[in-house]
Amino acid sequence: MSAIPSNLTGSKKTSGPGSPRPSLKHREFTVYGWNACQRIFETRPQDILRVLFSQSRSPHLKKVKDWCREHKLPYRKLDQESLNKVAASVHHEGCVMVVRPLKQPSIYDWMQAGLKKNQFALALDRVENPHNVGAILRSCAYFGAQGLLVGLGETASAISSSAARMAEGALEMVPLLETKSLSSALRDLKAKGMFIVGADPASRQGLYDLKWRWPCVMVVGNEQEGLSDPVKKRCDALVRIPGTGDMQSLNASVAAGVLLAELARRSPPLSKPPSK
């Protein structure tokens, strides 16, 4: 295995003998996966700090390497084992970027901006699996959700390298808004006139029969316990996704995709101003 210079891996340096290693998490973020890395280069190349790639990916990264040369940024071709180590994953698809963390809006600022009358967002209650969060974020981008609110529960952050890879670039497209109290956030959104709908397999109300109001926030709970009681109490309506009944529930990311597709289908067009 080739040695990996610390300036390429993001290894933390000590400030002196016996001193604790300072965290880089607020200054650097590792992104891996071809689509996720390409989206960063397309949307915010100025935030790239260094690039690592496999030999097979090298010919496809000409523009990225040209950018790095022009801006004096380090880039290097590594073998598979070294890339696995840098990404802390085997699912890097031959491309790893160390970048400045994406600055997400605060949930307060997002609320103040509000949603237009035909817009919708999704909220996650205790959905902590990074693969699910990333896949759901990708679906949010596909169906046009204006934000993904994540109730953190016991998780420190919903934004991880694994989630970014599963999002396939959607992390750069949809605001990801973290909150320690989803119930409080939904209360404030409801006070601003947003229609709060929770997904509940036990509800008698079917998804396709609901009389929707707009703007709307759809809430999905985790697969084991569903929506928590405090979150459920904030909902204006609870709906179930109709099925055959042979299976009790869906994977959280699959359920979110079904719900988002219906929201996009039902979303009313904005009325056009009268022509002069």
Image (tube, helix red, strand yellow):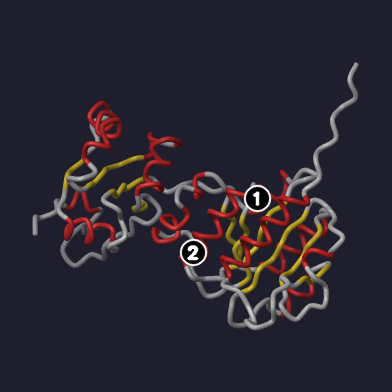
Work out whether 17 lies above or below 175: below
Q: Position of residue 25 (x, y in %)?
A: 37, 57
Using residue 135 as the reference point, say whether residue 59 is left or right of it: left
**Callouts 1 and 2 close, C-beta under 8 Å:** no
10 Å neighbourhood of mark 2: few (<14), some, or many (≥20)?
Answer: some
Write down the residue under mark 2.
157
* Front one among 107 and 210: 210
Amino acid, disc 1: Ala
Circle 1 is placed at which residue position? 145
Q: Whole-percent x and y of residue 158?
A: 50, 63
Left or right of 59? Residue 212 is right
- Please tell me which of labels 1 and 2 falls first in the chain: 1
Q: Which amino acid does the dot numbered 2 rest on?
A: Ser
Residues 20 and 133: in front is: 133
- Residue that protrudes farthest toward the left in the picture: 2
Can you tell which quarter of the image residue 262 is in? bottom right
At mark 1, the secondary structure is: loop
In this rendering, the answer to whether 211 lies above or below 44 is below
User: In this rendering, would 245 be left or right of 268?
Assistant: left
Provide residue 203's location: percent of width, then percent of height: 79, 78
